[in-house]
Image (cartoon, helix red, strand yellow):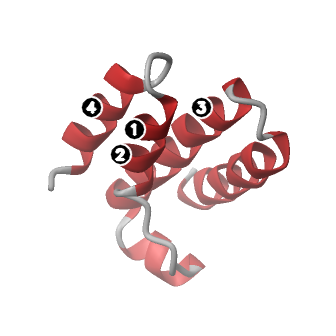
Amino acid sequence: MHIKLALDIGDVYEYEKPDSAIWWYSSVIDTVFSETKIKQTPCRFFYYATALRYLSNVLEHIGNYPKAIAYYEISLKISEIIK
């Protein structure tokens, strides 16, 4: 599935059906990555960082603050690596 499409679908569900938004955002996130891998494919990881940030927004909205903060931190780390 195209990453941008999954993010767009997640956006549609973000406030009306947060569980669906979480599923769509989570579907594009690569859970195994390293700094080397990020530097090799920065465009892909830009979308991963975006998905993590969007996922964090939904989690914050539904009150899951610890998980939201964790995903924000991962998104920030990826963003710092790809600049």
Q: Are marks 1 and 4 in contact (CB under 8 Å)?
A: no
Query: Above or below — where is 9 with respect to 79?
Result: above
Residue on which the image places disc 3: 58
Q: Are marks 2 and 4 in contact (CB under 8 Å)?
A: yes
| Callout 3 amino acid | Val
Q: Position of residue 55 (x, y in %)?
A: 55, 41
Marks 2/1: CA distance?
6 Å
Q: Are marks 3 and 1 in contact (CB under 8 Å)?
A: no
Marks 3/4: CA distance?
13 Å
- Tag on residue 20? 1
Marks 2/3: CA distance?
11 Å
Q: Are marks 2 and 1 in contact (CB under 8 Å)?
A: yes
Q: Position of residue 56 (x, y in %)?
A: 64, 39
Residue 47 appears left or right of 59: left
Q: Residue furthest left?
A: 1
Mark found first going from the N terminus, 1 or 4 = 4
Residue on which the image places disc 4: 9
Mark found first going from the N terminus, 3 or 1 = 1
Label 1 SS: helix
- Which residue sits at x=66%, y=54%? 80
Q: Position of residue 14 (x, y in %)?
A: 46, 24
Q: Residue furthest right?
A: 66
Residue 34 appears left or right of 22: right
Residue on which the image places disc 2: 24
Query: Which of the two residues, 31 or 81, is positioned nearer the viewer here?
Result: 31
Label 2 SS: helix
